[in-house]
Image (cartoon, grey):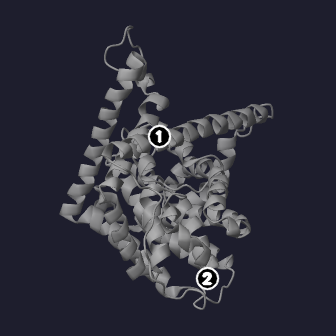
Amino acid sequence: MFGPENAQSLLGLLLVIGLCWALSENRGRFPWKLALGAIALQAVLVAALFGLPALRVALSGAGQAVDGLASSTQAGVSFVFGFLAGGPDQPYALTNPGSMFVFAFRVLPVILVVCALAALLWHWRILKWVTQAFGVLFEKTMGLRGAPALATAATIFMGQVEGPIFIRSYLTTLSRSELFMLISVGMACVSGSTMVAYATILKGVLPNAAAHVLTASIISAPAGVLLARILVPRDPETEKPQALEPESDKVYDSTVDALIRGTSDGLTIVLNVGATLIVFVALVAMLNGILGLLPSVAGAPLSVERGLGVLFAPLAWTLGIPWHDAPTAGSLLGVKLVLTEFTAFIKLGAIPVDQMAERSRVIMTYALCGFANVASVGINLAGYSVLVPERRNEVVGMVWKAMMAGFLATCLTASVVGAMPPALFGG
């Protein structure tokens, strides 16, 4: 049933597209066909994944797989860290069992295990086939050339810098619009390892969390392509058809080699995530301490979260969030942009079930599921400087605009989801 809240989400869709058009480098070259096709593709994918019985069963299986990964990972963590990891054999009486959910023991190790599994699936060519299938889908439905289409598909599963590695030798030949599109899509999506981590964080407060997180990353790719093409329109003269020979630096000697090197790569990601969270959360605490010295406003002390909530609440409302949830949702959007999506998901997962409507929680899951944040600007600059050093100055000139495109792409995705019938998600 289509209701006022669905129309509210449509307002957000129009707002996001209109804002990108207003900031476009060539407003006269609006990609109408791509806009209609990308939004239709998102809606069809959501309807198919949650509406078709077979695919809905597969998504439910994804949730069970996440539970299995989490429990299996916990067995390994408990073996190494013992009762500190929250195992059943505690040497003391627990007065607050919920406090045993320690991020470093429950979430970061999942990233490690998923990275190892991803390397294994890549060595067995399973993940490579899936990536190439999505590449063909994007090429046929969104008019992308073979190389950017493959990199876009790889980004969904591998990450914002890892995806372009698949077409490394083609990066110098991409048009400016295509290069901008790859950076934007990288910030609009997340990687396979972080998908599982987010689902683990939200499992206790959002039914079918794994299905929503997986769907969010997949359908945000078309949104990233669309907004990138609006901001930096395609130039037909520089985007000629080209033959494609997929490549990758990810070559493993054996199954054991894949597991070992995947674990090593995962350790790097875990250390980066953990260190980034420590630093950014510490900086916010410092700012809150300074703001706390100022007089209270509306009976409460000033804080970074309150300021971000006020700033982004109107945007959150246009996505389909009820106004009573909008300040909290706006704060989460701001935290995702200024800090990291990990921080925002942790805060979303900490909100009690009775303090935020399930519809709001679903919409925010899609709005937060992307790498668009200040830290990712540095990650992309470093990554592309290695992958295509001769175009570093171009990347420097467009990476902040790409962050905006990635941030708005997840908002567009959230709007599309908010415009869908609630019954589709079991609500």
The residue singled out by tag 1 in the image is 264
Give SS at disc 2. Answer: loop
The residue singled out by tag 2 in the image is 233
Measured as percent of width and height from the top left, residue 132 is found at 36, 69
Measured as percent of width and height from the top left, residue 6 is found at 42, 67
Residue 357 visible in the shown view: no
- The residue depicted at 18 percent of the width and 62 percent of the height is 54
Give SS at disc 1. Answer: helix
**In the image, is 280 to the left or to the right of 97?**
right
Amino acid type, mark 2: Pro
Q: Residues within 10 Å of mark 1 (few under 14, many from 20)?
A: some
- The residue depicted at 47 percent of the width and 68 percent of the height is 152
Front position in the image: 108 or 117? 117
Relative vertical location of residue 230 with respect to residue 363 in this rendering, above or below? below
Amino acid type, mark 1: Ser
- The residue depicted at 54 percent of the width and 74 percent of the height is 170
- The residue depicted at 54 percent of the width and 67 percent of the height is 168
Measured as percent of width and height from the top left, residue 213 is found at 40, 53
Relative vertical location of residue 291 with respect to residue 310 in this rendering, above or below? above
Quarter of the picture containing the C terminus is bottom left
The first of marks 2 and 1 along the sequence is 2
**In the image, is 273 to the left or to the right of 360?**
right
Q: Which mark is residue 215?
A: none
Relative vertical location of residue 270 with respect to residue 311 in this rendering, above or below? above
**In the image, is 99 to the left or to the right of 204?**
right
